[in-house]
Amino acid sequence: MLARILDKAVSGERLTREEGLALLQSHDLTALGRAADAVSRRLHPEEYRTYNIDRNINYTNVCTAVCDFCAFYRGPNEEGGYVLPRDVLLKKVEETVALGGEQILMQGGLHPKFKLDWYEELLQDIKSRFPQVNIHGFSPPELHHFTKVNNLPIRTVLERLKAAGLGSIPGGGAEILVDRVRNAMTRGKVNTNDWLNVMRTWHEMGGRSSATMMFGHIETLAERIEHLDRLRQAQDETGGYTAYICWTFQPDNTDMADVGKIGPYEYLKTQAVSRLYLDNFANIQSSWVTQGLKIGQLALLFGANDMGSLMIEENVVAEAGTVHFLTLKQIRDAISELGFVPRQRNVFYQLADSQREQFAIEANKNFGKNTLPVLA
């Protein structure tokens, strides 16, 4: 039966939930990887594989939600809470641009006090100084939170943020899009339908976003497939998702530390099945941030066509004790070693021109040496 399902997926036919579950329940990692790679090469016959340069800027860790899986957040009155001063945040954007980045990934906790105009001013400050930078910002939990704090419909919130400079939306806060799972490990956070509705509304406005899955905690294999099925249905409706990224739960320093950490076998299997199931998603990103260089590279043979971001800064996963940092050279070499040409792209999967790509390569050679060049 496994071979029949894999042949069906490789040929481009849509899998059912039952077939997706059968793949997750199988133990033939080699067969799953081979099929996922075949699908990836069918969708991406080009000679290159891509990566991005951006920075994850967490403007605040103050959050009213209580997520047992999160080591990053601090309660509104808890010690260790912060809000980045505006000049510090802008300096982080400046450093990103100096390293060849054209995007920032900006997310934070669900702050109880900030009104929408605070976020509008934040976006305007960034865009006025760095108009070329795409702001990939505010995950669906944040955006849904804004509707509650401001007593506004989601479309109004999104329209105002878009006018202020919001360029695209990251897929954070999805975890598992099944309310049984969400209710068991988080309080005060967006539910499944509202998460999807934020994205649906943004897509209806012409916006683009990414989609994610954090797995390997309390969900069942069937619930992983339910998550994928909801994303696939949503993509059928709007076509607004640019990419899908999955990663394993990092339990250290969280209230779910007793769950234990799953390994690369389960990661590669789940990513491969995701590639086979999400037939309407063009791009799959590797998660080297949680898996490290070698497994992140191997993911390019298990359905991924993109190495993700250089990620000049990352705080959320790092708080959970997982610290993998790669240089631009390591990312490019990982792609080259597999026989592909490494190419820089933006969040919309448009390739950088040769001048910008070469600029980033040269800038990153000097990263940390205080000799960053200026792009003419």
Image: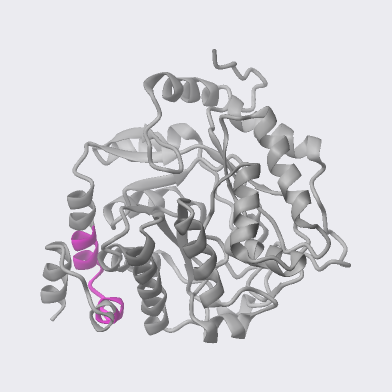
Q: Residue at x 24, y 79 (%)?
A: 16
Looking at the figure, which quarter contains the C terminus?
top right
Please tell me whether the stretch drawn in magenta is mainly helix, strand or loop.
helix
Q: Residue at x 60, y 50 (%)?
A: 137
Along the line of sight, which residue is nearer the eye, 369 or 233?
A: 233
Residue 67 visible? The answer is yes
Q: Is residue 188 magenta?
A: no
- What residue range appears in magenta? 21-36
Q: Is residue 27 magenta?
A: yes
Along the line of sight, which residue is nearer the eye, 331 or 245?
A: 245
Give the x, y percent position of residue 102.
Answer: 53, 33
Q: Residue at x 61, y 32 (%)?
A: 96
Q: Which quadrant of the view contains residue 149?
A: bottom right
Q: Say above or below: 104 vs 72.
A: above
Q: Residue at x 34, y 68 (%)?
A: 232
Q: Please indicate whether residue 237 sits to the left or right of residue 92 in the image.
A: left
Q: Please indicate whether residue 298 sits to the left or right of residue 118 in the image.
A: left
Give the x, y percent position of residue 83.
Answer: 81, 51
Q: Please indicate whether residue 262 sits to the left or right of residue 17 in the image.
A: right
Q: Which quadrant of the view contains residue 240?
A: bottom left
Along the line of sight, which residue is nearer the eye, 354 or 31?
A: 354
Give the x, y percent position of residue 99.
Answer: 57, 28
Residue 317 visible? The answer is no
Q: Please indicate whether residue 30 sits to the left or right of residue 153 in the image.
A: left
Looking at the figure, which quarter contains the N terminus?
bottom left
Extreme top residue here?
A: 376
The chosen color scheme is one colour
Count of number-bearing discs = 0
Give the x, y percent position of residue 139.
Answer: 59, 59
